Amino acid sequence: MPLTFRKSFRILPGVTLNINRKSVSVTTGGKDGTPKHTVSSNGRRTTSMDLPGPFGYRHTSTKRSRRRSKSSD
């Protein structure tokens, strides 16, 4: 079984700092039917919301790396 590390700190009401082995993220919202927004240090942005019943919504977007093209002189 691999070792994992994850720690969450509540900074303010509704704001959580999450630390794991590969990144650091900040989460806001998520109570009383409001969407939860998470922004991670590795470029991932996630929006999720619990809907009534067995439904849920999640949208994740990731920063794409920019490729630098070599200019020919």
Image: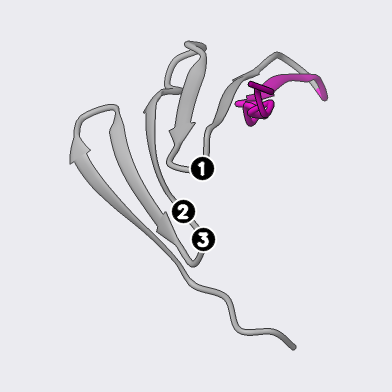
Counting residues from the start of the chain, the first of labels 3 and 1 encountered is: 3
Q: Are marks 2 and 3 in contact (CB under 8 Å)?
A: yes
Q: Quadrant of residue 39?
A: top left
The residues tagged by marks 3 and 1 sit, at their Cα atoms, a distance apart of 8 Å
Q: Which mark is residue 22?
A: 3
Residue 72 position within the rendered picture, expressed as x and y whole percent measured from the top left:
69, 23
Residue 49 position within the rendered picture, expressed as x and y whole percent measured from the top left:
61, 18
Q: Which residues are magenta?
A: 54-73
Q: Which residue is mark 2?
A: 23
**Residue at horizontal 42%, vertical 21%?**
31
Q: Are marks 3 and 1 in contact (CB under 8 Å)?
A: yes
Circle 1: residue type: Asn
Residue 15 position within the rendered picture, expressed as x and y whole percent measured from the top left:
28, 31
Q: Which residue is mark 1?
A: 42
Most frequent secondary structure within the magenta stretch: loop
Q: Secondary structure at mark 2?
A: loop
Circle 2: residue type: Ser
Q: Give the left or right position of residue 10, taking residue 50 as reference.
A: left
Tell which of 10 and 22 is nearer to you: 22
Circle 3: residue type: Lys
Q: Which mark is residue 54?
A: none
